[in-house]
Amino acid sequence: MQKAYLFIGQLAGNEGFYLSLQEAGYILIFKPTVELATGVVKGNVDAELVLHSAAIQYINYDKAIIVSGDGDFTCLVEFLDRKDKLLNVMPPNKHFSSLLRRYNHYIVRIDLLRETLERKKKYKPTKKTEINGRSKP
C-alpha cells in the first residue's frame, strides 16, 4: 500500500483546498503558521517531516520519497540512505541544495517530469469534418 504524506501549514479559509488534497489521496499533517513582518506566512514543517520519517512512521514503510530540495533534509536523506529506506529525493527544479549533491543517484527533478505528470486534456473531436476551413456538407 502506498501513502503520500503532505506536511503543510494550516490556514483558515483553505479548507476546500485541504479537502481536495485529501480526496486526491494525501494524508495531511497540519502545522500552525506564523506571519512574518514581511507578510509572508510560514508553516515550519521540516522538523515534523524528519520526525515522522525517522521515528513515527519509520516501521510502516519500505521506501521513502522526499519531495524537497531543501538542504535541511540532508540529515534525513543520509539516515534513510544508511538504513536502505530511501527511494528518491525529488527537488522541484535544478536549484536544489548543494548538500544533497552527494545523493545525486537518488535525485529525480520534478521539472523534468512535467510532461509526464501534467493532466492532459482529452481530445474531443468535433462532429463536423472540416475541409479547407469549411464544414463538410
Image (tube, helix red, strand yellow):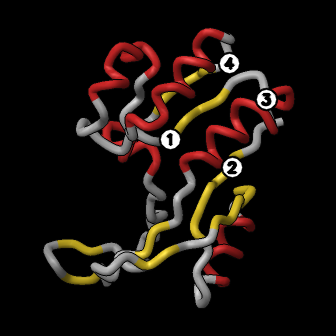
The crowd level at tag 1 (other Cα within 10 Å; few <14, some 14-19, many 20+) is: some
Nearest to viewer (mark 3 / mark 2): 3
- Decide which of tag 1 and tag 2 comes sooner along the chain: 2
Q: Amino acid at mark 1?
A: Val
Q: Quadrant of residue 134?
A: bottom left
Compute the Cα span from label 3 to label 1: 17 Å
- Are the residues at dot 2 and dot 4 in contact (C-beta closer than 8 Å)? no
Task: State how far apart marks 1 and 2 are (Cα).
Answer: 10 Å
Of circles 3 and 1, the one toward us is 3
Quadrant placement of the C terminus: bottom left
Q: Which numbered disc flags the more N-terminal residue, 4 or 3?
A: 3
Among all residues in the image, which is located at the extreme front? 37
Which is nearer the N-term, disc 1 or disc 4?
1
Amino acid type, label 4: Lys
Q: Seen in the image, is 97 located left or right of residue 107?
A: left
x, y percentage for residue 52?
72, 41
Q: Secondary structure at mark 1?
A: loop
- Earlier sequence position, callout 2 versus callout 4: 2
User: Which secondary structure, mark 2?
Assistant: strand
Q: Quadrant of the N terminus?
A: top right
The residue beneath circle 4 is 85
Find residue 45 and report its horizontal and vertical position in percent: 57, 54
Amino acid at circle 2:
Tyr
Per the image, label 4 sits on a secondary structure element best described as loop
Q: CA distance from mark 1 to mark 4?
A: 15 Å
Q: Which residue is mark 1?
A: 67
Residue lying farthest to the left in this orientation: 132
Residue displayed at 58% across by 14% down: 81
Say few, some or many: other residues with alpha carbon within 10 Å of mark 3 (under 14 / 14 to 19 / 20 or more).
some
